[in-house]
Image (tube, rainbow, N blue to C red):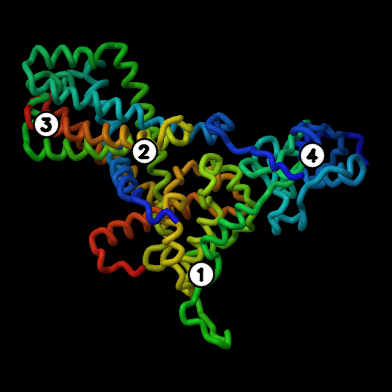
Amino acid sequence: MSGRSHEPLFWSLFAAGGVLAALFVPVFILVSSLLGPFGWDWFADAFAYEGVRDLLEHGLVRAAVGAVVALIAVHACHRLRHLAVDLHAPLPGTLISLVAYGGAAAVAVLTAVFLALV
Amino acid sequence: MNRPLDRRLGWTWWTRNGSYFRIFLREATSAFILAEIVLFMLLIHKAGQDAETYLAYRDFLWHPLMVVFHLVALAFALWHTISFFLIAPNALPSQVAGRRIPAAFIVGQQFAGLAAVTLLLFLWVAWVGAT
Amino acid sequence: MSDTTIRLEVFRYRPDNGGPSFQSYDVPYHDDWVVLDALNYVKNYIDGSLSFRWSCRMGVCGSCGMQVNGEPSLTCAAFLRDHMPGPVRVEPLTNFPVERDLVVDMNGFMEKLDHVKPYLVREDEADDLSAEYLQTPVQLDRYKQFSMCINCMLCYAACPVIGRVDDFIGPAALALAQRYNLDSRDQGKQMRQDVIFQNEGIWECTFVGECSEVCPKHVDPAGAIQQAKLEGAVDYYKRLLMPWARRS
């Protein structure tokens, strides 16, 4: 017997991030990267230099953005880890996990730092 | 003499039929979601620097080739949303307080939440852009 | 006898006689024949050396599972008419070691079933075995779907994780664990959870969901495993935050 797994820790973060990704990512792509270039001025202005700083001005918005980005990063990296394993990637499982969750942690920490510097 | 034959599914399992392939696409949504998240992280980074640096990065994000990428990413993101919402009824206990919850109700609630979040974010960003 | 025939391409393997190969047989076509009827025709009239398992011919015993045109199927429920004009490729269930022709070794599966104690466990079993344990329809409804399993192993043939991890307990056994864990008469949940909350229990599963697609009894093992994952996550945090509450 190998004893109880620690996977629930990662799985629960994956699930939480999955809900956030399902809710936020489509509309985020739409307003940040599609409506502007397709000529909708409000969204072009919202992502002009002053606009984006206004969007991120409030402390609560920054905290929420940081938390949502962190959880979605864990979600995506957890899934990529399992996809790599399910595709029989010829690497040790612990190495794949280390790269995946290390990458997610890096995105979370860097985003928090960048948010603080805006 | 007894030599059982090994016929396990190998790494190409996802090419065997359509439903395996749809699952492969579902898992692959994570690559596009991660890419968009990293692009967003860099956008926040540039927003903390001077206007020129920021606008150069934004113009890269809005380059026609990147817009094509965003469209593909949006398709994958929507596939994540749909597949994730459809799974949810399976993960929840079949009864609450002795009563069965119809799967359609759970799925419907989630899409209602999606509509609300989408509308709110859309209006908020539009409002910041308009003022 | 009808004049129409249909071609079967049957997987042959005799361990003392070279590697695996496919052998073609032309059998009479009937509207109401299933693949198992065609295999029995081959066995009785064309080639008595062909080996395969079957018993009830009516989707109850779960012993005639094979790959029919690549899809794990009960051959007693796979009609030839759905595969006209043929050919119909018949292979042993994927993921299992093949003993001979269409016969697979199911010992690994039987051991996995054993791990999850798929029976009612009582701590206070009466010595005379005369005790009654009543159950309401609502209590029955909680687990009934997961109790329909006939151990046909189609779900194991459909699972890519089984192909990768020999020790993965797998869909049918995990659905049965959930079946007994949800049963109001059972007291063995703790023992089963010690097994299914390991990596080789539910946590190897990546919800490909093909197990539920191929299940002839609509057991939905993938759903059972997802439910168990949610319980496992809650249990994990409980044990983490309240270590004094651990029973085992």
Q: CA distance from mark 1 to mark 4?
A: 50 Å
Q: Nearer the viewer, mark 3 or mark 2?
A: 2
Q: Nearer the viewer, mark 1 or mark 4?
A: 4
Question: What number is the disc on residue A15?
Answer: none
Residue type at numbered disc 2 = Thr
Question: Which residue is disc 3 drawn over?
Answer: A113
Both on one chain, marks 3 and 1?
A: no
Which residue sits at x=92%, y=35%? C3
Q: Who comes first in sequence, dot 1 or dot 4?
A: 4
Q: Are marks 2 and 1 in contact (CB under 8 Å)?
A: no
Q: Is residue B122 above or below residue C46?
A: above
SS at badge 2: helix
Residue A52, percent from left and from top: 12, 24
Q: Chain of mark 1?
A: C
Q: Secondary structure at mark 4?
A: loop
The amino acid sitting under disc 3 is Val
Read off the chain for label 2: A
Q: Nearer the viewer, residue C10 or A99?
A: A99
**Residue under pointer 2:** A94
Q: Nearer the viewer, residue C126 or C81?
A: C126
Q: Secondary structure at mark 3?
A: helix
* Disc on the earlier residue, 3 or 2: 2
Mark 1 highlights which residue? C140
Q: Which residue is mark 4?
A: C16
Q: Indicate the chain on which mark 3 is placed.
A: A
Q: Position of residue B6 (x, y in %)?
A: 64, 38
Q: Position of residue C237 (x, y in %)?
A: 28, 57
